[in-house]
Image (spheres, helix red, strand yellow):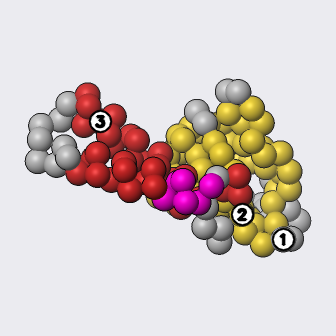
Amino acid sequence: MSLTLRVLAPDQSVFDGIADEVILPSTTGQVGILPGHVTMLAALDTGVMRLRDGNGWSTIALMGGFAEVESDEVTVLVNAAELGSSINASTAEAEFEAAQQAAASFEGQATSPDKLKAAQSLARARARFQATKAG
């Protein structure tokens, strides 16, 4: 048995295929999905989705959204997504380090729109960097 997986962003279909297992970054923690999973709707955080098929594990960087599981079909609707295999690892690492420095510059300060933007940029950069490391 396998799962039918679709990952859709507003501007593109990121993935449409078969997977044996899916691990989602939900807002309450990692959620593993196997064939026969109960029907579920989950809010997704910015993070890395992992999927296993006959060729091993692969990753997709997700930028928040929702996932629906029903009858061995997993539909993931996200604000943006990127296949881990299409992300340049060195560029992603440099962006992650820059985002860490930017977020650190707000440490100890009161919450502000700029501080929130820096935290969101850090989460996106972390997801992209982590997605370059399949498995």
Labels 1 & 2 near each other (Cβ < 8 A): yes
Question: Based on the displayed image, in which of its 4 quarters is residue 80 positioned?
Answer: top right
* Depicted 110 relative to depicted 69: above or below: above
Residue 58 numbered tag = 2
Q: What distance separates the C-alpha of mark 3 from that of mark 1?
A: 39 Å
Between residue 45 and residue 134, name the one nearer to us.
134
Q: Which residue is rendered at x = 59% and y = 60% of the image?
A: 89
Of the image marks 3 and 1, the number of the one nearer the N terminus: 1
Q: Position of residue 91 (x, y in %)?
A: 54, 53
Labels 2 & 3 near each other (Cβ < 8 A): no
Q: Secondary structure at mark 2?
A: strand
Q: Secondary structure at mark 3?
A: helix
Of the image marks 2 and 3, the number of the one nearer the N terminus: 2
Residue 116 numbered tag = 3
Q: What is the magenta range?
A: 88-93
Q: Kindly identify the amino acid type of the residue bearing the numbered disc 3.
A: Leu
Dot 1 alpha-carbon crowd within 10 angstroms: few under 14, some 14 to 19, many 20 or more = few
Q: Kindly identify the amino acid type of the residue bearing the numbered disc 2.
A: Ser
How many numbered tags mark residues here? 3
Where, quadrant-wise, is the N terminus in this rendering?
Answer: bottom right
